[in-house]
Image: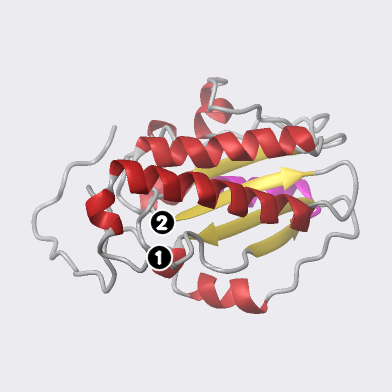
Amino acid sequence: MARPDRPGRTATRSLHPQPPNSHQSPIPPHNSQLMVNRRVFDDEKHIHFVTFSCYKRRRCLESERAKRIVIGHLGSLLAQQNGMCLGYVIMPNHVHAMVWFPETGQLSLFMNKWKSQSSHALKELYQIRFPRYCSQINDTDPFWQARYYGFNIWSYGKFEEKLRYMHENPVKADLVDHPGDWPWSSARWYLQRKSVGLPIQLPPGLETDDRSVVRG
């Protein structure tokens, strides 16, 4: 279940306007630097762990509808490129996902479309649902921070490590007590085989591993 506000915590004031119902849960400060400097390799059929964040770490994914938009575009674009989603988590100001494609050279195209199409839909949502918030920011600001962080996964152990890291994000951010309590991740599929808004699949070879059902 979601955690209530805890006594003794001092609220910190953001340098940027925040959407309604904001709480503090920034992504680690080193991630923005990695997204700028890290090269992404897509010449082998590896699993890709990707991370990207809202512009200036604004908490623009607070609303349920915003999260549904991101998940919806993830699922539809993977279907178009015959890709698979192995896991994901939507946080208030950033996104993690693990994806796989049967052909090489697909990741950049996929990420460009995911960010571009979701950005258009999310900006439209904010203009309609949150006009007061939109009036406080520059209308030329992008929705997403430039680029993304990519990490190639080629072993089951690393897949399991990144999956657990994703699912524990909401717990570490004090949003819930248990990974399965956060409705905006793939944790419930792995823990209880519940629907999480899009198909969760494992690529050839990984699904035959005896440990392919990851708990936690």
Q: Which residue is mark 2?
A: 93
- Marks 1 and 2 close (CB-CB < 8 Å): yes
Is residue 174 in view from this perspective? yes
Most common SS among magenta residues: helix
Q: At 9% across and 60% down in the image, what residue appears?
A: 8
Q: Is residue 164 magenta?
A: yes
Q: Give neighbour class at mark 2: few <14, some 14-19, many 20+ (Cα, 10 Å).
A: many
Q: At 32% across and 40% down in the image, what residue appears?
A: 177
Q: Is residue 205 left or right of residue 38?
A: right
Quadrant of image for the N terminus: top left
Q: Which element is circle 1 on? A: helix
Task: Choose between 151 and 122: the one closer to the eye.
Answer: 122
Q: Could you tell me residue 167's position as x and y percent? A: 50, 43
Task: Choose between 37 and 191: the one closer to the eye.
Answer: 37
Q: Amino acid at mark 1?
A: Arg
Q: Which residue is mark 1?
A: 57
Q: Which element is circle 2 on? A: loop
Q: Amino acid at mark 2?
A: Asn
Q: Is residue 38 left or right of residue 174?
A: right
Q: Is residue 156 left or right of residue 37?
A: right
Magenta range:
153-165
